[in-house]
């Protein structure tokens, strides 16, 4: 099979890869996008059936195409995936689906990369990794395989009917964990949720969505995460029309809150005594947003109606005031554990020393230490909004600009040297 040659190869056709292709096309850069599944595959196959976007349709989109739905609503996962397919078709993105990249290494004796794929070898002058942050689902090695106990990552959860009868423990209180736990509770399941440190912003306040507040308060454009903030999950949801996540309210509806999951032995799962502290820190995060929003309204004089009810905090439920330190899974009837515990990165296919001790790429705004190798779509690539739909579009434009600059240098041809004797003869 002949080796294919391309100027720029983009790996991944999720939101980052589609955005990258648009900007490369506008810059006149010959390129190809490889996707091992379908465009926006993770939205389709790594999400539960009822998932909706965490931001409203007016916000969670690219600038040049609106969602075909209520701008204030929260589009479902299939609608989001369809949006990226339609966006790619809008500018005829050169995307090749069903092709997996297995290795990227340096070419010998010339600049560029040798890219081995499931469909052959490609040589590329430049490579952009647009594989995103959700690569390897993490299930902590706490509970061993146990007969009668189903353990899955949140990426494998689809709907309540697929789970065995019995109670469910959800470990993780970020957006995925809280939404899945809420859905199971609404389906009539007995639900426990392990709540670790988290941020708990308002879904909306004073008539404006949280995404809008992040924008006007300059939060999307923060370039460096506050100490420890990069590792704190955010409990926010667009489900059921969009409501603020409130763990006390979930408890009042019958959900049992426990602290951070720590250990397992002889059928008993134990938890840290931190549930009250974690809930309190979430409250502090929530109230801080309201304070900043109120200060912004006072400063700008905007006509946004006050919302004093938003500051009302429900009493702590018994599971918070008297923390549950251990659960006997069999006695509690828990037949399923859903681990909403995040993801690890996988760059085993990248044959360069460009990863830090934490496994994350070393880069500056997506420009790696290896000439011609770029990253896009990672959290905090250039700012807080980098891994979100609208933010990745702007990062991709910056990377496309850098590629254009390098192509201009590579294409530079100095003028031919002047023939001094010929000029002298002509002047004579």
Image (spheres, rainbow, N blue to C red):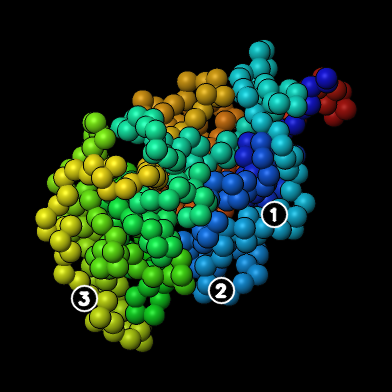
Image location of residue 91, percent across then percent down:
75, 55
Above or below 35: residue 62: below
**Residue 77 can be seen, yes or no:** yes
Image location of residue 137, percent across then percent down:
46, 37
Label 2 sits on residue: 71
- Which one is nearer the viewer's eye here, 375 or 236? 236
Label 3 sits on residue: 312
Left/right placement of residue 56 relative to residue 190 reads right
Q: Are marks 1 and 3 in contact (CB under 8 Å)?
A: no
N-terminal of the pair, mark 1 or mark 2, is 2
Above or below 41: residue 414: above
Image location of residue 242, percent across then percent down:
43, 70
Q: CA distance from mark 1 to mark 3?
A: 43 Å
Residue at image position (35%, 84%) is 304
Residue at image position (32%, 33%) is 143
SS at mark 2 in the image: loop
Residue 271: name its quadrant. top left
Label 1 sits on residue: 85
Above or below 362: residue 224: below
Q: CA distance from mark 1 to mark 2?
A: 19 Å
SS at mark 3 in the image: loop
* Residue at the outermost left position: 322
- Which one is nearer the viewer's eye here, 120 or 356? 120
Q: CA distance from mark 2 to mark 3?
A: 29 Å
Location of the C terminus by quadrant is top right
**Residue 230 can be seen, yes or no:** no
Above or below 78: residue 407: above
Disc 2 crowd, CA 10 A, few/some/many (<14, 14-19, 20+) = some
């Amino acid at each position: 099979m002949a080796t294919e040659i391309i100027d720029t190869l983009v790996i991944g056709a999720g939101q980052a890869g589609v955005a990258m292709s648009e900007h490369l096309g506008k810059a006149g850069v010959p390129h190809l996008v490889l996707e091992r599944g379908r465009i926006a595959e993770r939205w389709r196959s790594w999400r539960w059936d009822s998932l909706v976007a965490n931001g409203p349709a007016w916000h969670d989109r690219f600038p040049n195409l609106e969602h075909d739905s209520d701008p204030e609503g929260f589009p479902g996962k299939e609608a989001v995936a369809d949006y990226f397919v339609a966006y790619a078709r809008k500018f005829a993105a050169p995307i090749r689906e069903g092709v997996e990249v297995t290795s990227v290494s340096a070419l010998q004796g010339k600049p560029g990369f040798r890219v081995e794929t499931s469909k052959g070898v490609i040589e590329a002058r430049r490579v952009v990794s647009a594989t995103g942050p959700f690569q390897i689902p993490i299930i902590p090695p706490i509970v061993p395989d146990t007969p009668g106990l189903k353990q899955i990552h949140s990426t494998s959860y689809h709907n309540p009917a697929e789970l065995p009868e019995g109670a469910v423990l959800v470990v993780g209180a970020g957006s995925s964990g809280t939404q899945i736990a809420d859905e199971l509770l609404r389906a009539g399941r007995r639900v426990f949720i392990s709540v670790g440190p988290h941020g708990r912003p308002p879904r909306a306040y004073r008539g404006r969505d949280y995404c809008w507040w992040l924008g006007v308060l300059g939060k999307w454009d923060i370039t460096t995460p506050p100490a420890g903030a990069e590792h704190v999950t955010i409990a926010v949801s667009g489900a059921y029309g969009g409501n603020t996540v409130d763990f006390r309210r979930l408890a009042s509806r019958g959900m049992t809150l426990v602290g951070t999951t720590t250990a397992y032995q002889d059928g008993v799962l134990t938890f840290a005594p931190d549930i009250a502290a974690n809930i309190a820190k979430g409250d502090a995060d929530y109230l801080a947003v309201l304070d900043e929003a109120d200060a912004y309204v006072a400063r700008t004089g905007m006509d946004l109606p006050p919302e004093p009810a938003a500051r009302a905090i429900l009493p702590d439920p018994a599971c918070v005031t008297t923390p549950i330190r251990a659960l006997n899974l069999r006695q509690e009837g828990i037949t399923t554990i859903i681990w909403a515990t995040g993801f690890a990165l996988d760059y085993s296919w990248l044959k360069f020393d460009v990863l830090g001790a934490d496994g994350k790429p070393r880069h500056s705004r997506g420009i790696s230490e290896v000439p011609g190798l770029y990253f896009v779509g990672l959290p905090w690539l250039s700012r807080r909004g980098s891994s979100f739909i609208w933010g990745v579009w702007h990062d991709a434009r910056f990377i496309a600009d850098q590629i254009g600059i390098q192509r201009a240098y590579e294409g530079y041809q100095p003028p031919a040297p002047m023939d001094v004797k010929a000029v002298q003869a002509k002047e004579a």
